[in-house]
């Protein structure tokens, strides 16, 4: 039997920064990988590894690993960390559902749960505080929280579908904002914003309130938390 917690964590990561890659030029079986910029988020990779290992999936020796690569924007070197699994039949089956060629897609069979949403939020979610046209904070009077998800790798239609899932399951409204790509002027990408300010933010964060799975390096995404 497939471990439910591990499976949900894997799905949440596929919604976020995680990816599946086929070996042998799209003819082989699939492996999973997840990377984070810098080394501060090594603790999150350790959490994800522990959850996915519940599925009996093996990771490459030495994970999580730290490497240095060149920034596409500045050309400067920077550190990043990553985990990568060995190939696995479950991952190969998921690749058939989550990918069209090499592009990740949102399957129509997607079901949101607290664990799936939590992992997705830690990967791609953002909690910003504003006070009028100024930066706010959870302890600054007049500040309002705004939760959003970075969904640039999906189509606007897929992000609308995701937003409707969030609305149906959690009960918060949303809108899809088309952002401007700074690297490629004229290009746009969809981002999912949660509408409703403090009440909506509290409802979403309460839905994913699992402190035991939240690493210290990402606690800032829960600032104010369920006490909003």
Image (spheres, rainbow, N blue to C red):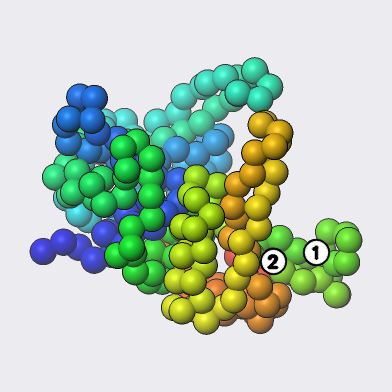
Left or right: residue 72 versus residue 64 is: right
Residue at position x 69%, y 66% in the image = 146
User: Dot 2: what SS?
Assistant: strand
> Label 1 neighbourhood size at 10 Å, few (<14), some (14-19), many (20+)?
some
User: Dot 1: what SS?
Assistant: strand
Residue 174 higher or lower than 149, as above or below = below
The location of residue 5, given as percent across then percent down, is: 28, 64
Q: Nearer the viewer, residue 80 or 166?
A: 166
Residue 174 higher or lower than 168, as above or below = above
Residue 53 higher or lower than 183, as above or below = below
Q: Which residue is mark 1?
A: 130
Q: Quadrant of the C terminus?
A: bottom right
Q: Nearer the viewer, residue 21 or 5?
A: 21
- Residue 146, numbered label: 2
> Label 2 neighbourhood size at 10 Å, few (<14), some (14-19), many (20+)?
some
The location of residue 17, given as percent across then percent down, is: 45, 46
For the residues bearing labels 2 and 1, Cβ distance under 8 angstroms = yes
Left or right: residue 8 versus residue 186 is: left
Left or right: residue 102 versus residue 130 is: left
Q: Is residue 205 visible?
A: yes
Residue at position x 20%, y 24% in the image = 24
């Amino acid at each position: 039997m497939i471990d439910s917690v591990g499976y949900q964590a894997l799905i949440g990561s596929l919604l976020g920064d995680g990816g599946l890659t086929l070996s042998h030029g799209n003819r082989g079986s699939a492996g999973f990988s997840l990377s984070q910029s810098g080394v501060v988020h090594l603790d999150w990779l350790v959490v994800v590894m522990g959850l996915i290992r519940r599925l009996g999936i093996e990771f490459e020796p030495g994970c999580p690993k730290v490497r240095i690569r060149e920034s596409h924007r500045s050309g400067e070197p920077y550190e990043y960390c990553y985990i990568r699994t060995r190939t696995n039949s479950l991952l190969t089956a998921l690749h058939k559902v989550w990918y069209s060629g090499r592009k990740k897609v949102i399957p129509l069979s997607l079901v949101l749960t607290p664990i799936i949403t939590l992992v997705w939020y830690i990967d791609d979610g953002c909690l910003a505080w504003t006070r009028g046209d100024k930066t706010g904070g959870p302890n600054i009077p007049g500040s309002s929280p705004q939760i959003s998800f970075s969904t640039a790798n999906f189509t606007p239609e897929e992000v609308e579908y995701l937003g409707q899932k969030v609305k149906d399951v959690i009960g918060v409204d949303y809108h899809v904002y088309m952002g401007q790509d700074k690297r490629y002027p004229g290009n746009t990408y969809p981002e999912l914003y949660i509408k409703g300010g403090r009440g909506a933010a509290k409802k979403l964060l309460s839905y994913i309130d699992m402190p035991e799975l939240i690493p210290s390096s990402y606690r800032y995404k829960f600032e104010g938390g369920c006490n909003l």
